[in-house]
Image (cartoon, rainbow, N blue to C red):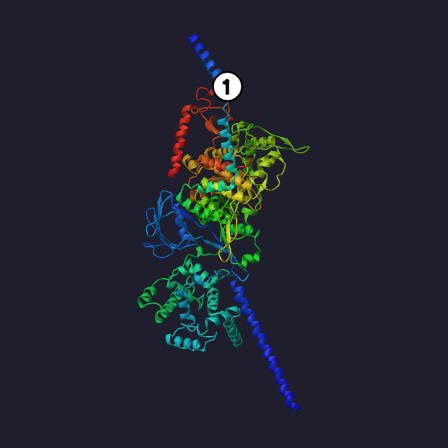
Amino acid sequence: MNFRISIKYIFSILTIVFVIFILAVVSVIDRRVTSKLDGVLWTVPAKIYSRSLEIAEGGKVNINNFLKELEMLSYEESSNPQNPGQFHYKENNIKLFLKGYKKQESGLYEISFEGNKVKSLKRQDGIRIDLISLEPMPIGGMYPSHMEDRLLLDWTQVPDRLVKILLAVEDQGFFDHYGISLKSISRAFFTNIKAANIEQGGSTITQQLAKSFFFSSEQTLKRKAVEAIAALLIEFRYSKQEILLAYINDVHLGQSGKRSIHGFGLGAQHFFGSSLKNLETDQLALLVGMLKGPSFYNPRRNPMNALNRRNIVLGVLRRDGLIKEEVYMDLKIKPVKTIKPSFRSETKYPAFHDLVRFELRNNFEEEELRSEGLSVYTNIDPIFQASLENNIVLTKEKLVKKYGKKLEELEGAAIVVDIQNGEIKAVVGSTNPSQFGFNRSLNAIRPIGSLVKPFVYLSALEKYQDFNLTTTLDDSRLSIPISNNSSWEPNNFDKKYHGNVPLHKALWQSYNIASARLGIGLGFDSVGKTFKSLGIKKKIPQYPSLYIGSFEMSPFEVIQAYQTIASDGFYSPLRSIRDITDIEGKSALSYPYKIEQRFRPEPIYLIKFAMQQTFIRGTARGYKQSTIDKWNVGGKTGTSDDQRDSWFVGYAGDYLVLVWFGFDDNRPTPLTGRTGALELWKNFINDINPNSSTKTILPRINYVWTDIGDGKLSGPKCKNSILTPFIIGTEPKNIPSVRRRCGSMLEDESSSVIKKLKQVFEKKKSETN
Amino acid sequence: MRQINLIFLYLAIILVTSCASTSKQVPTPTNTMELDVFSSSVDQLLKNKDFLKSEILKINASKPSIQRILNESDGFWVKGNLKRANSELERALRISKNESSVFLRLSHIRLEQGLEVESGSFAARGLLISNVSSWERLLLNVYIKD
């Protein structure tokens, strides 16, 4: 009796222990399943996008750049565009089948150009419209440590065709089973035997989903049992629709470097550069076919395997009546086409990413960036970025060719900014721009050389009662005692003294001694105030060499200060990000256009005149006058002591571009601002060929003929005379007797008539442009 | 000849002095009052934000594409969604840099957002555009703080 009781007792205990064990196992599996399906699966890294290009009727556009953009967005040339992502260009006319983005509907549009202007925009039905938007280009993301990346889809974004193909190939009885299906296993077995090929898998979609939650790939009985329990739990906890959507978002479709491509949404972007809803049946068949072996059937690496597998899937669709015989025959012979690898949506443009991360970290936690599915819309112009990256490499190659191997380690940085609103359009932080690493555009702190001079001269021109463009500056020997036994003696680049020179000439010739004297005369307080107003936040050192550029700044800080000058005295903080939306597309944070008027427009007008002379007769000369007028260019070269730094900053059209070259270890280079940085500036500007910009006309500015040499009044027929702008009331009054014969003092009536005619002509020209 | 000149000078002096005396004799404060009343009315109107907003909403862009964006922006603005209105205006400026209608709207929206300095800066920027009408110029000047 006792023996019986004890056996029964032990058996009961064992049963309880077993049940507890099973319950514990189920509980662990359940926790894993729910944590994945409710959490990790839906964590989506932040995606970063370029700006969206908008084409407006009557707006300006560079056709070559537009065609390059279409190529980067994976649009394909086709004689008869009928599908999203196709276009045809012929004689100033583009027929473009847009893929669609936000409010911009997908469809066929016709754009006609006249010169660099959009003449007309029409829809397919012939109705004229005034605006179209291209989709922004994905340029990277903020990936978590497991590097899983996906584009999360909801049901409205999943095409019905995909579901049909998926169920036909992977799980025909999906809506009938409870996670495990013996029928599926036996059907797959017989189908595969019949086809002498593996057309179907035995696992249900639920099992496959369960399998993906457990990272081990071992094929043991224990593991199969765990997967089966997980599948049953998934079916118990979630609806069929939820399971299918999770599967569509979770499937692994390949690797891109360290990044893992998950889900059909990202798969469509990664391989075809298009959204899932735009894919053709053969493209969907390929993606579904790839599930069997994402690496083996990768269409880029193994195109033949991919083609065969796609055709097997198409065969299944024909067999199940999902496509007709003739459609099958047409699709079967279509080649497998994917977008070029260089345009894949991977993280590229390292220096720009640095800037974006730098701005994002002020408002978001790292975890939010890696999991909340944010979309970060930036200001980057992919055409400008590509050109800048390409040209920094080419320019360095040319410099190495010219100066020899000593320049092989030459480094560089460049930034392109929209003058008016401070939007950053392109950045490189190295002469090897595709590599992540030290970003010199943000972090290289270097002496700015003569780039400081416009800041000093602007301080003077703000005191317009005392200074104008022809105020003479003393460029003779200067010696300032700095300690008991030594003194500071600045030199000019040409090692010469130039005596009295007009202020504007001292700037465009970049005379050091005249500039130092001017700065010393103005004082640290006055110049420091200008620095601050320009947007320079760091403390200004109080030593006289400051006025000729011993001051150290990063390229980013320098271009911020020049943005204030280029935009007529309006400071706008530079921005790489435009807008951030959450996973549902609602605006999470925007970075609005901010401006603050820091200078009156007239002194800025004068300094910009002198900076334009840099291109006409100064250190950046070489462009035709018509080009100078068209782009309304202006700029300044900069070279630090012993030519350790080569700088150039200049504006053309609507853009301000800064370039720096130098060595990381600060050793001397053979380059000046003109022979180094200016070369890249020119190569880039010539390549993007910006549209013309309108010159600001100020009523308080009057032009007067002056002499380039002495700055005194001159006349239109006198040699070395230049039409110089003055704030009204500050013009020089007397003409030297030697020039009385060759010209009148102020602009005479005839020249003012010519000026007016010129203004009318320019206005008409700008209208036609 | 010299005598003729003296006669002309004499006549001119008489004419000037008579005009001066006439203006002293006829007190005409009516016109001045009307002008003062008119000026102060205009001043009052320009201080009225609702009036300004309604006037700005009537100002159209010079290009149809910009006008289309302005319509969208105005729709958001009227509903009080300043953030969306602002982002549409920025969009317009990217297409056309010199649209006073856009700068006027930005000036007023910044004022509504309590950003007075920025409002004035947008107005000052708008005033640099060459083809601004007198009415737009007057409105832009309202936002400029001394």
Q: Judge from the rendering whether residue A80 lies leftward or rightward of residue A591; answer left or right.
A: left
Residue type marked 1: Gln
**Element marked by disc 1:** helix
Q: Judge from the rendering whether residue A438 lies leftward or rightward of residue A752; answer left or right.
A: right
Q: Is B139 or A692 nearer to us in this picture? A: B139
**Is residue A741 in view?**
yes
Q: Eyeballing the image, is A92 above or below A608?
A: below
- Percent from the top left, x then y, of residue A249? 47, 64
Q: Is A744 or A485 nearer to us in this picture? A: A744
- Percent from the top left, x then y, of residue A612? 47, 35
Q: Residue furthest left?
A: A326
Residue A530 falls in image quadrant? top right
- Percent from the top left, x then y, of residue A461? 54, 31
- Percent from the top left, x then y, of residue A384? 45, 47
Residue linked to disc 1: B25
Q: Eyeballing the image, is A448 above or below B14?
A: below
- Packing grade of label 1 (10 A; few <14, some 14-19, many >=20) is few
Q: Is A493 or A24 nearer to us in this picture? A: A24
